[in-house]
Image: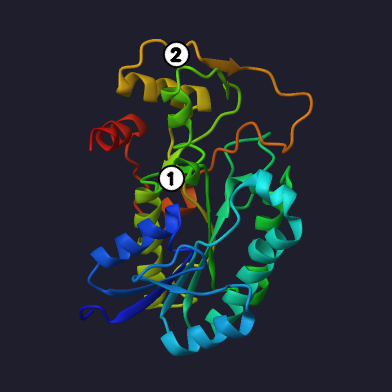
């Protein structure tokens, strides 16, 4: 394959995952990468409102990409709950539209979904297990999956768990945001110590996405398609993550972090207890699912 013969479009390229997918694509000689964003645009990113169908169609007809990785979404369950109409449009309708357009221009399409399509009662979850989302966010992402499959049976859906990585602000990640609580010893903070999570670095997710896409572009509809799961294997609660951060930062006294070991009787958003995802389907097609150990990545990052 000659250098940079294929173009890849990354939506949501200003976000935590999208930025890393851009960086990974730029490292690989086969790709020319075009990123889109709405509010956080830059010289490297093109402004595009994904809810404007004609604008999206004009953009794709102009760029003519060989692949589209759709990272843009409303990922915050509480925000999704408060802004249901906008979230439903972005998370459920837009993916189907993009998948349809990708098929029309013969571009390989990947949609990023979530472990929150499951209820957390029977882990680990395989790709053919029946979804049962507990909250509105999960329901919209599942609706997005269904829209993608209906519009483009050759598309790939990659479900991922809670993500972390290099952030522009801590709130970009439900993992990174815990750093603020650990460092603020003057403020008592309740931290969940009950629900199992499998924090996964966006560096690893981006690598897997580009590996999948490289296979897919070579044979759209014949290489990889359908649903896959990708997750790190380390099981941790958010309280466990905080203890790791405290250890790395040399914070001996963590009395300000209050471990919550019982479910709240009333919650703004219901969350599943354990949505561990099985990597078996990716392993079956030869994708490397190794992950950087959580503490190792954070030790390096916090020393930079």
Q: Nearer the viewer, residue 272 or 233?
A: 272
In the rendered image of this protein, does residue 137 appear above or below residue 238? below
**At 46% from the left edge and 77% from the top edge, which residue is drawn?**
220
Looking at the rendered structure, which numbered label has been put on residue 89? none
Residue at image mark 1: 169
**In front: 159, or 260?**
260
Taking depth in this image into account, of 186 and 101 the one nearest to the observer is 186
- In primary-sequence order, the first of circles 2 and 1 is 1
> Where residue 302 sits: x, y (%)?
29, 33
Residue count near mark 1 (Cα–Cα under 10 Å), binned few <14, some 14–19, many ≥20: few
**Circle 2/circle 1 CB separation < 8 Å:** no
Position in image of residue 49 (x %, y %): 57, 73
Q: Is residue 95 above or below residue 14?
A: below
Q: Nearer the viewer, mark 2 or mark 1?
A: 1
Q: CA distance from mark 2 to mark 1?
A: 23 Å
Q: Is residue 279 above or below residue 4?
A: above
Among the 4 quarters of the image, the one containing residue 189: top right
All told, the count of numbered labels is 2
Q: Which residue is mark 2?
A: 254
- In the image, farthest residue toward the front: 186
Name the quarter where the N terminus is drawn.
bottom left
Callout 2 secondary element: loop
Give coordinates of residue 301: x percent, y percent.
28, 38
Left or right of 56 on screen, residue 295:
left
- The quadrant where residue 233 appears: top left
What residue is drawn where x is 21% and y is 81%? 2
């Amino acid at each position: 394959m000659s250098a940079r013969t294929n173009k890849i479009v990354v939506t949501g390229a200003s976000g935590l995952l999208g930025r890393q997918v851009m960086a990974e694509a730029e490292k690989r000689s086969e790709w020319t990468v075009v990123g889109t964003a709405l509010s956080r645009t830059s010289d490297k990113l093109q402004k595009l409102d994904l809810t404007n169908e004609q604008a999206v169609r004009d953009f794709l007809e102009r760029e003519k990409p060989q692949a589209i990785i759709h990272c843009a979404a409303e990922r915050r369950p509480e925000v999704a709950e408060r802004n249901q109409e906008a979230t439903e449009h972005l998370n459920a309708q837009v993916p189907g539209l993009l998948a349809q357009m990708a098929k029309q221009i013969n571009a390989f399409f990947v949609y990023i979904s979530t472990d929150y399509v499951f209820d957390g009662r029977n882990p680990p979850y395989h790709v053919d297990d029946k979804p049962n989302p507990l909250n509105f966010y999960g329901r919209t992402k599942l609706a997005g999956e269904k829209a993608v499959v209906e519009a483009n049976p050759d598309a790939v859906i990659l479900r991922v768990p809670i993500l972390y990585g290099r952030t522009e602000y801590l709130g970009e990640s439900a993992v990174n945001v815990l750093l603020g609580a650990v460092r603020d010893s003057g403020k008592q903070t309740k931290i969940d110590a009950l629900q199992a999570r499998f924090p996964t670095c966006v560096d690893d997710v981006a690598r897997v996405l580009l590996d999948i896409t490289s296979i897919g572009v070579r044979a759209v509809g014949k290489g990889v398609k359908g649903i896959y799961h990708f997750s790190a294997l380390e099981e941790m609660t958010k309280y466990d993550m905080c203890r790791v951060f405290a250890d790395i930062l040399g914070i001996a006294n963590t009395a300000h972090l209050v471990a919550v070991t019982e479910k709240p009787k009333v919650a703004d958003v219901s969350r599943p207890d354990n949505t561990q995802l099985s990597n078996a389907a990716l392993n079956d097609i030869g994708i490397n699912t190794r992950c950087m150990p959580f503490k190792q990545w954070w030790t390096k990052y916090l020393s930079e």
